[in-house]
Image (tube, helix red, strand yellow):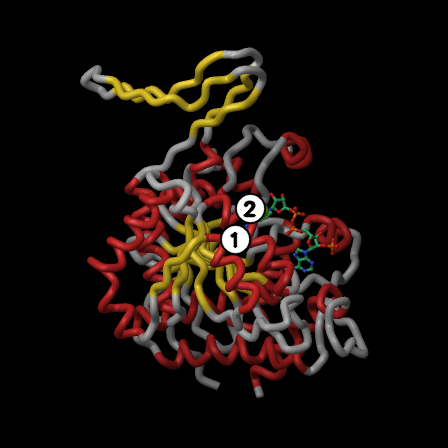
Amino acid sequence: MAKINMKTPLVEIDGDEMTRVLWVVIKEKLLLPFVDLKTEYHDLGLVNRDNTNDEVTVKSAHAIKEYGVGVKCATITSNAARQKEYNLKNLYPSPNATIRAILDGTVFRKPISVNRIKPSVNTWKKPIVIARHAYGDVYKASEMEIDAPGKVELVYTKTDGTEKRILVADFKGRGIVQGMHNLDDSIRSFARACFIYAIAEKLPIWFATKDTISKIYDGRFKTIFSDVYETEFKEKCSKAGIEYFYTLIDDAVARVVKSEGGFLWACKNYDGDVQSDMTASAAGSLAMMTSVLVSPSGVFEYEAAHGTVQQHYYRWQKGEKTSTNPAALIFAWSGSLAKRAELDNTPDLADFAKRLEKTVLDVIEDGIMTGDLAKLSDPRPEKVLNSWEFLDTVAGRLSR
Ligand code: NAP
Ligand code: MG
């Protein structure tokens, strides 16, 4: 069988532990037999990050900028325990944070839906994708305890020395206070990334804030989002057949649980933090959640939402064939190949990516699955497969 050609390489970012083990098997069984796979490989395994003083992480992010599409395995974020375990010279920030800072991206999380795994919200027919703004607000706030009566003011000192101040509260007793901020540029980048993603995926886009109460702060989010829509994306949205819908956050939450799903929900930082956990657990399982980083310049990085599945790795090291679910990792590959195909105009590769995803879904629908899904599946499957058996089944069907 002739292999499918690729025009431009994908940036391949390898990672750690169980996901690194499965990464090789996925390539060997599901990709290399079918695709003349071209990648520029970056090893972000913890040992190599330490050996290169984390330069490999920075290089991989710049490679994504250059080529446009990357696919990333899960990576360990180092901490004291990992330093000891891997005998590391230094501790570095999370690779995802480093890459996100270079690409100026927004993270989109989308569940992989299968009929056998019913969402807890029974009206949901299609996935809800969450886009989380990842800068500022309460995550970069300064806070203080107030231990006795006194005034708290916000003081803004311009570089020319002029001042603006407003009263926050006149405390009569003990209390607490917090100051937070955001940046127009960051909000604009976030809005652009949301529209680029929504148009690419042909999903209506919802955005919500509490601008009735927070007229200046949340009001600014609403205004910038609306400006970006009106000036840059209105026509493109209309061509893609999708609508932009703004509402109050309370109204959004109420509508989400009564909806059929099938839209992009753009969330401010805190809303996205909380609501992505809600939609992920209501939709099924962490092992069935994909994640893509989209930069406002239109550069994409695909990964699974889960981590390196550390405990499974320790059992694999002892010789166990673990039942780790490779679905989200496979979808990271198929997502990146489909995007590559779109940018390079290579329909054969696009077809293959679609077929790969459909095969994984068909196999699960037929009751062939790993342990994490077996627990949630209705009806229950007859047999629980280990990762290798699962991947062999997918590979067998793909070659047919
Ligand atoms: P995790 O790797 O996502 O695993 C947490 C638990 O979720 C697992 O113990 C397992 O539960 C279940 N699980 C996750 N993925 C699964 C899969 N594919 N198949 C079956 N079960 C799955 O999170 P963690 O244990 O908190 O973190 C481990 C390492 O991953 C850490 O070093 C962290 O820094 C890193 N991490 C990386 C990323 C990333 O690169 N994007 C994201 C998160 C965490 P059971 O044990 O019950 O089977
Ligand atoms: Mg959270």
**375 or 34, which is in the foreground?**
375
Q: Is residue 41 visible?
A: no
- SS at mark 1? strand
**192 or 322, which is in the foreground?**
192
The residue wearing badge 2 is 45
**193 or 166, which is in the foreground?**
166
Picture layout, residue 289 above or below residue 154: below
Indicate left or right for 99 with 25 as reference: left
Looking at this view, name the residue that lies furthest to the front: 172
Q: Is residue 64 visible?
A: yes
Some atom of ligand 1 lies within 8 Å of the CB belonging to the residue at label 1: no
What residue is at 64 percent from the left and 68 percent from the top?
119
Some atom of ligand 1 lies within 8 Å of the CB belonging to the residue at label 2: no
Q: Position of residue 64 (x, y in %)?
A: 36, 53
Numbered mark located on residue 189 in the image: none
Amino acid on which the number 2 mark rests in the picture: Gly
Disc 2: CA contacts within 10 A as few (<14), some (14-19) or many (>=20)? many
The residue wearing badge 1 is 14
What residue is at 56 percent from the left and 73 percent from the top?
30
Q: Position of residue 29 (x, y in %)?
A: 59, 72
Q: Quadrant of residue 293?
A: bottom left
Query: How many badges with numbers are in the image?
Result: 2
What residue is at 34 percent from the left and 56 percent from the top?
299
Q: Quadrant of residue 385?
A: bottom right
Q: Earlier in the sequence, mark 1 or mark 2?
A: 1
Q: Quadrant of residue 380?
A: bottom right
- The quadrant the C terminus occupies is bottom right
Looking at this view, name the residue that lies furthest to the bottom: 400
Disc 1: CA contacts within 10 A as few (<14), some (14-19) or many (>=20)? many
Indicate left or right for 155 with 263 as reference: left
